[in-house]
Image (spheres, coloured by chain):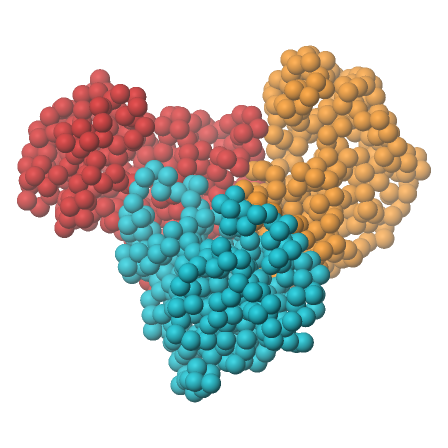
Chain colours: A cyan, B orange, C red
Amino acid sequence: MNREARATSQETRKLTALKRKDLLGIRELDVDEINLILDTAEVFKEISTREIKKVPTLRGKTIVNLFFEPSTRTRTSFEIAGKRLSADTINISVSTSSVVKGETLIDTARNLEAMVPDAIIIRHAVAGVPHQLARMVKTPVINAGDGAHEHPTQALLDALTIREHKGRLAGLKVAILGDIAHSRVARSNTFLLTKMGAFVAVSGPQTLLPPGYDQLVDDGLMVTPRIEEALEDADVVMVLRIQRERQKESFFPSLKEYAVRFGLTEERLRLAKDDVIVMHPGPMNRGVEIASEVADGPYSLILDQVTNGVAVRMAVLYLLTGGSAAKLTSSESVQ
Amino acid sequence: MNREARATSQETRKLTALKRKDLLGIRELDVDEINLILDTAEVFKEISTREIKKVPTLRGKTIVNLFFEPSTRTRTSFEIAGKRLSADTINISVSTSSVVKGETLIDTARNLEAMVPDAIIIRHAVAGVPHQLARMVKTPVINAGDGAHEHPTQALLDALTIREHKGRLAGLKVAILGDIAHSRVARSNTFLLTKMGAFVAVSGPQTLLPPGYDQLVDDGLMVTPRIEEALEDADVVMVLRIQRERQKESFFPSLKEYAVRFGLTEERLRLAKDDVIVMHPGPMNRGVEIASEVADGPYSLILDQVTNGVAVRMAVLYLLTGGSAAKLTSSESVQ
Amino acid sequence: MNREARATSQETRKLTALKRKDLLGIRELDVDEINLILDTAEVFKEISTREIKKVPTLRGKTIVNLFFEPSTRTRTSFEIAGKRLSADTINISVSTSSVVKGETLIDTARNLEAMVPDAIIIRHAVAGVPHQLARMVKTPVINAGDGAHEHPTQALLDALTIREHKGRLAGLKVAILGDIAHSRVARSNTFLLTKMGAFVAVSGPQTLLPPGYDQLVDDGLMVTPRIEEALEDADVVMVLRIQRERQKESFFPSLKEYAVRFGLTEERLRLAKDDVIVMHPGPMNRGVEIASEVADGPYSLILDQVTNGVAVRMAVLYLLTGGSAAKLTSSESVQ
């Protein structure tokens, strides 16, 4: 397969540094950049298993978590990642922000920049806001989720998790199930996985499959309302979170109906390969999009994803603040 | 007295480490464990008096404050305790938590665990939640207050305060006054003090004395609606906070009525011993459960309690993350 | 000019330490103290330009941000200042505070003090609260804004910014425009600038010029409803934020009306000197009190103010926790 070959051949040309200011989405990354981040994350992952889970790598750096949407897990994951690298972390959440006072994004951005942070992590309900921010400031900006657009560190941690368990990404069939229309996780994963030579099958209720999604990437992508078709012979199944508020918007009749028709049960999972792995970005609605016995089953890697999230975010913070993979392997930086 | 002798004799058998994963309540602790924590807290207390109030003991450890109920003083006390031991502290409060999104406790718990914290401190309005959490994760869990059940670090800091001023706990009469029915502080103190050989007299309005409280422990406990009986010859008086919202539930007619009939005034305090000490877990309702002249009187140890709170929490964090008293006295860890 | 001569002559008598416990307002500071803080801030400013933006100066110190009013920029600025000095910072915001539970300020204050912090930074909607707090505790207290009273670190960072660009404060004409009546920034700046020998012209709608403001200081101050008079030949123009909620209180007919009659436009700015500099404490209402082309113009120092805010707060934290300028210049403390 062409995409596979391309992805694999490129792996020989090893990058040692990330030559971009920001991490805004997966769409603009190339295979080498993705591999660099995943390889760096693997090195950093070991730190969280140590007795003293901290390295001085980012000592004296200031990292700002600027969250316009509430989030426990992503904010905490970035905060822990920063602290394990010895950075100083500053949390700013919308409720206490002067955005309430009607300040424009550009002024918030420039003001933050004037305090000389080394990275700004931003989550916002509106797609494209991190990109606007990135254009406004010289500081590296990391998109921690923008509307239904991208959530690049989620796709990277998913990729790291798959690679750990399958040894590769190229050639795998990955099913992504659920609310495709509103999911930044689906989009970032679709970009990443197809770039890396995997085949992606997305499925969900017709009302939650956005028209044109099949044109998101050139090839390696199938969109189908038939969940069985997506699951068939899948190596990996990613289940998306159903946002309960969507029900009010009449995208589906009821949570129960959703569970019966689209929930990932053990029975449905039997359509996939025997060594399938199951993932979910969390937080889960048990009994809705995923049955508890699947979430807790032996093929479930949901907690590996969380662990890998810290490692991927350490890698991204390191690389965007000028870190190089060459330095890392010479093991100066992580002593 | 039997209990006194028992408590005292046991003090000769010195523990050097806490052989349990969690601190969930006082009920399950034995005398040696309580003494170990108090002795360790005494060592750590000195750190907060130094010019540089910080030791590297928990460097590279991650401590999570998971608060489902708002709290300034307990959260701040744990956060300062962690920071003075050089731990990284992460605050998660319910308003920004994904619990809002309907995630189950078990998923919140496992997700946190997957980020490899070294201790989780939890406060929750529902009794037993910290115990559930502790069963779900390998991480040490510290109960920072669960419903009307237990608040073990409060009882420990109270015990440290009494021991400092009376030289012992065994043989003392301790009056606990107020809303006994809804107080985790009363329960944890009742367990601790009776275990350590003190005699506890609890008192409050009949409507706030729960039936069966007298059977909480085997002996050393008296329950009486007559505040004078509890106060008579007391060595220690602990005044509990009246929660104003209880008034709406008709447990007592009015705050003023409560103050007149059950508030600790100087006059009432004269029933206690001449060298009585007065304590309150805070925040106080001055003029309701305690008169200002008592709260600010020379026998009041209310601020000593707060200072000791930091020391006790340092000790608990240290012991639950594998610290040993032996190491401490060899003074390697607190340099 | 008398004031100028006085301010300048005093500059020869160099202080090396701040002989006061608290920083509550500019009114009580003398010229030497102001110069000491500004000179110290200049030294600290360099730290934020380093690769490793952190010095061990306040290692082991605990700094509490006690904010009863929401604030992003001031809280973040103090937090970054503390962290760049290696202090531990604790954030307490009103929504999670036990003040909600009805505790008195004195109990909140004493409780905080009992945890042995090294400085308390307080913002409160009521004028005088930081002063009350300061009397109650031995801990240094820094006023981060109290009602319409004072905001001393804002005036200090403004002064640092002017001094950097004009080389001096004495002899300059500074126009302060906007809602003078409700502005702690206007008051603190009026005190500081007139003390340092500058001439201050405040202007705004008559309804927002409080009677008696002209008697705030002995001389060097003019109050006028004619914005042109204030702007004429000004070396510095400070534009204050219009709080949108004031409109409801009928201080002015509409935001649009305000913009037309009092907003700082390029045209109005031409009344000032050719080398005028423009400042705003933020957050700005673009198109209301300040036109975007002015805010973003070459004479605008709005972002320099933010950068200088971190430096001034580092200086204040350092000096109030016992730091001395002598030590600094011997460069032990900032290595």
Q: In this view, does A246 lie above or below A140?
A: above
Judging depth in this view, the residue of A74 and A208 nearest the camera is A208
Asked whether residue B170 appears in the rendered view, the answer is: no
Q: Position of residue B270 (x, y in %)?
A: 74, 17
Judging depth in this view, the residue of C72 and B106 nearest the camera is B106
Judging depth in this view, the residue of C2 and B56 nearest the camera is B56
Looking at the image, which residue is at 21% across and 35% down?
C288
Asked whether residue C102 appears in the rendered view, the answer is: yes
In the image, is A294 to the left or to the right of C245?
right
In the image, is A114 to the left or to the right of B114?
left
Q: Is residue B174 above or below residue C45?
A: above
In the image, is B69 to the left or to the right of C234?
right
Q: Position of residue C146 (x, y in %)?
A: 37, 30
The C terminus of chain C, quarter of image: bottom left
Q: In this view, does A132 lie above or below B170?
A: below
Looking at the image, which residue is at 73% across and 40% down?
B127
